[in-house]
Image (tube, helix red, strand yellow):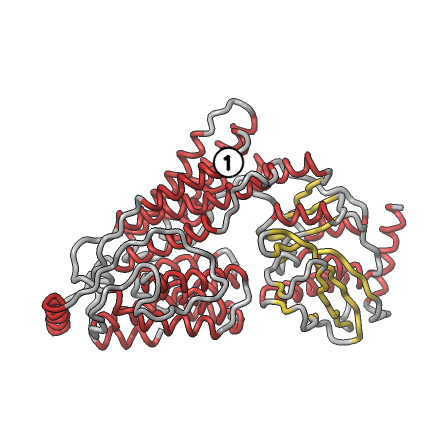
Amino acid sequence: MRFLNLLLALLAISGLASAVQCNGTTWGLIPAVMGEDGGVVNVTATLVPGGGHAFIAVYPRVGVATQESAETAFDYAYAKVGGSRRCDVLISFGSRDGAGFIDGPSGGTALAVIDYSLLTGIPMRRDTIITGAIDSRGNVGPVGGLYEKAKSSTRAGAKYFITPTEDLYEFFILKRLEASGGLTVLQAKKVDDVVGFMLENKSLEQTPISESKREIPDVAPYNGTGLDGFAKVAARMIDAENETATSISGADQDSATVRDFFHNEAARQRGILAKGYVFSAANEAFLNYIDLSTIRAIMAGQPDLPRAKGEVGACLSSMPRPGLTGRNFEWVVGADLRKAWAYDKLNNTPTDDNILQDERFVRYNELMYGDAWCNVGKALLGQSPEGGAPINESAWRGLAETKIGKARGLNPQNPDVVSRLHIAQNSYGKGLYGAAIFDAAYVIAMAESDEEQGNAKDTQVLLRQERDSLWGRVYQSHAAFLMSQNETDSAYRTARLAEELDNATAEMVDATAAGVVENATAPVNGSANGTTAPVAPNSPPVQENGDTIVALGGGTMLLFLLIIAIMLWLGRTDGTHGKRIGRAYRAKQKKG
């Protein structure tokens, strides 16, 4: 049978260039994360005469990442078979689980296999479900939600589940699922290997997790001027990761592998940090800390979810919130964001006793995001500079309304982006207008990036622009790192986020300098002016006990305005960017 399949493949490939029959239909199942669970999407591909293009049906709606993934997959399949591009492929997604919107690159590898099967006429095996992105070089790229996708594959009756190379947390959680569900999990690095397994009955060689350690990337140094404070936050996150790895003290092989792997990861991140990519290093350490905490729980046995939730809540309740000033507001707002994200996790992570054992570890992993965000928030506050003219957050209320209105008008579809919009609306309702502005800026940047479909050239244009705000600089550095790793789509989106945050910060400075302050106490729960805040009907509940934000009034108000006027006249710095607050500075910001 194997020889026959190989012979068919050779005959199909040799004859494709001269006698392509642009017809035929095939299908495959692709796993997806849908809400809090996994599902499978039935993908149908049909060949028709054309010029070598991929077309996707209009329903269900698909995001830009899915479109790009489908195009890359078809390019790969055509390049593999050779010959002239005389056929188009028509792709339709029919969900078994009612998904009305599909986004993300995770179907790329499966689509490449489906397209290759269609072009060659070689049938695929039907006992396997595949997840994994694809790049132009035929690599299988990382994707999220592997546990949910593995569960959905089991429910669909799959014998094998092919994934990209897993990180250690995914390795442990999928091995538990593998042992209990009769599903064999296989890892793949190259699409060619997946094609061999799916069409030619070749084995899929597995690399031990201990041999998948990453090296320090060879990247050019980045000029991180003004990011020394955030570099200390990154170093603290790396230390937390390293200490957690050391705390796994077992003498067994699994424990030793975990310690060795993550100590190597910490060394990698210190190398990235030394090159000036402060957020890139911090983000890797942040994600590893979460996975390490979960691995430790897996090794120790079933986690106590209510206790873990309570500990995260206690951490968040102990996070102080200093008064906003012209020197510290970016740091404080950054901490407010992390606190809001963490409470959203707590509110939306079930911890009841009815959760299945394997599912409990996934929920624990979600709660550890809240724990990590709390640690980052405290680190940000620890680096916030002292002094500076006080800021009344009510000055930002109108800007927050405008940003949220624009974000809602863009009608984002990506679930993560929609979640951030809800969090922005909740922050607005609590009087945390700075956090609402920054989260709305994120939604705007992500939604507009989907429409713009920026390429490498567009990204380079953005990277050449100077950023003046703390968060503009932080995310600009990360965009530069992603670009150095050839992650063009992510680099463009991150650079757009840096631009949007830079502009939002400048607008906040403008609003403060203009003295747009109301003689009222900004409420912690409810709208800022006694009317209904722009909160979506289905926004998740907020359990946080907010901090009181006191507005300035009477003589204090006049003193505040006088201080601002003197600062503008003298051209003094606000201490946030080391730049003057004046028309030239603000005009430069508005240009983006």
User: SS at mark 1?
Assistant: helix
The image shows residue 281, relative to residue 66, as above or below, that is above
> Which residue is labeled 1 in the image?
261
Residue 295 percent location from the top left of the image = 52, 35
Q: Residue 252's spot in the image, x, y percent? A: 55, 24
Count of numbered circles in the view = 1
Q: Nearer the viewer, residue 268 or 319?
A: 319
- Image quadrant of residue 204? top right
Mark 1 burial class by Cα count in 10 Å: few <14, some 14-19, many 20+: many
> Seen in the image, is 9 located left or right of residue 539?
right
For badge 1, the amino acid type reads Phe
Q: Residue 230: in sight, yes or no?
A: yes
Residue drawn at (52%, 62%), measured in percent from left and top?
A: 488
The residue lying toward the viewer, choosing from 237 and 9, is: 237
Left or right: 427 as drawn, with respect to 66: left
Q: Residue furthest top?
A: 251
Q: Residue at x 45, y 64 (%)?
A: 421
Using the image as rendered, state which of residue 250 and residue 356 is in the foreground. Answer: 356
Q: Quadrant of residue 39 in the image?
A: bottom right
Location of residue 545 with respect to 301 vertically, above or below: below
Where's residue 412, x and y in %? 52, 68
Residue 242, above or below 474: above
In the image, 236: left or right of 83? left
Q: Quadrant of the C terminus?
A: bottom left
Percent x, y for residue 128? 75, 48
The residue lying at 69 percent from left, 61 percent from top is 76
Depth check, front residue: 521 or 171: 521
Question: Does the rendering let one see residue 278?
Answer: no
Q: Residue at x 70, y 71 (%)?
A: 57
Viewed as shown, does residue 81 lie left or right of 235? right
